[in-house]
Image (cartoon, helix red, strand yellow):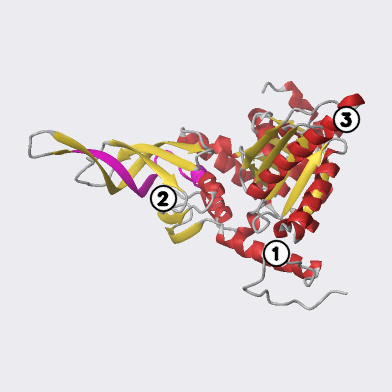
Amino acid sequence: MACKKQSPSPSRSWTEPIASHSPQVLYKDSEKKRREIEVARIMKIVRRDLVANGPGSVKMVPVDSDDLWYAYNLIAPGDTVLAVTVRKVLREVASGGRDAERVKLKLEIKVEVAEYDKVGSVLRIRGKNILENEYVKIGQFHTLEIELHRPFVLRKVVWDSLALDTLNQASDPAASADLAVVLMQEGLAHVILVGRSLTITRSRIEASIPRKHGPAIAGYEAALNRFFENVLQAFLKYVDFNVVRCAVIASPGFTKDQFHRHLLLEAERRQLRSIIENKSRIILVHTSSGYKHSLKEVLDAPNVMNMIKDTKAAQEVQALKDFFNMLSNDPARACYGPKHVEVAHERMAVQTLLITDDLFRSADIPTRQKYVNFVNSVKDSGGTAHIFSSMHVSGEQLAQLTGIAAILRFPLPDLEDIEM
């Protein structure tokens, strides 16, 4: 019988038994804490002063890597970005020589190029300075580095509908789709974090596993246990149940079941509370391999989709699945490529538009505006539009189909005769 929830004693040992808490209470407490952290991890909008489809500025603070990706998608050539930066300057000294010194100063640059560094979690923005400063002349080039927890101000001449949608998603905790995935097979494992807009491989574990049969059986079991221990250490390092909705262990065959058993046994033996208290949030999924391309099989799994069903990422995965199903079963009601999708829309046939955010990052402003207007036109005609992150597995799949596709309201078999 479940006991009443008790307040933990400050002096309680880490290794004491936790049987006084029922699984239901533990799960609810863990889920509540996760949601509180989820809210704290969204982009902080400090100040918003803008007009829809007009000029304005937003001061924001990126809190995690997803926020930097949203900022990367918000910042376009011609915008201005104001931030504190460090610049190397030369000072004259009494001896007549010059000394190099690093000076912290505030610059505002007109954006020419923006680059996102996923590994370093930094956004680099290059352009000409437009703010009077004793160290940097107006018109001089400078590269701003926007890092986590560093505020910056973004100004636009026009905050179009796409920019406003991106800003709203960046500050919406419901958009989160944080999953931890351990993709594995014997001798190979990837620990992958799936965020709102990014899919990041945190660890790759490789090991040589001898054959299971014959006299090498003892060596096989020892090597497999060492491999599982290395995966367990990566799991403990990168999987935070206060952040992720669930952890998925995926593999072909029985590797996932063997590792899951190892994980739970070691958690009990070592009293690893993060695993013991969240074992109901660990899901097993069958995949064809332990390589990263099998991540799409994980996201297609019904038990995983059920955990993230209210998120933007899940809606995109489902939309792409619907598209491929339509392409297989009724190909006249599915099309891809800019020309075919545009013609389909001219005939009021587009029911669901699928488009990657890559197409909106064109340095050519009229090209960007063309796609923004296209998305708005589809919505105005009663269709739905999904803008896929090119850093997600579903966005990568869509990019292989030119980055734009559509599910149609009615068949258009003659589209095949139009050159793409």
Image x and y of residue 300, in percent: 79, 42
Report the disc number at residue 30: 1
Amino acid type of disc 3? Ile
Q: CA distance from mark 1 to mark 3?
A: 41 Å
Q: CA distance from mark 3 to mark 2?
A: 62 Å
240 horizontally vs 54: left or right: right
Q: Earlier in the sequence, mark 3 or mark 2?
A: 2
Q: Report the residue that reaches farthest toward the right.
A: 214
Q: What's drawn in magenta, residue-wise?
A: 71-90
Amino acid type of disc 2? Leu
Residue to which mark 2 is pinned: 154
Residue at x 68%, y 21% (from the top left corner): 419
**In the picture, which quadrant includes the C terminus?**
top right
Residue at x 46%, y 32% (from the top left corner): 364
Residue at x 91%, y 26% (from the top left corner): 213
179 horizontally vs 19: left or right: left
Residue to which mark 3 is pinned: 217
* Above or below: residue 1 compared with residue 164: below
Tell me if residue 279 is in the magenta stretch: no
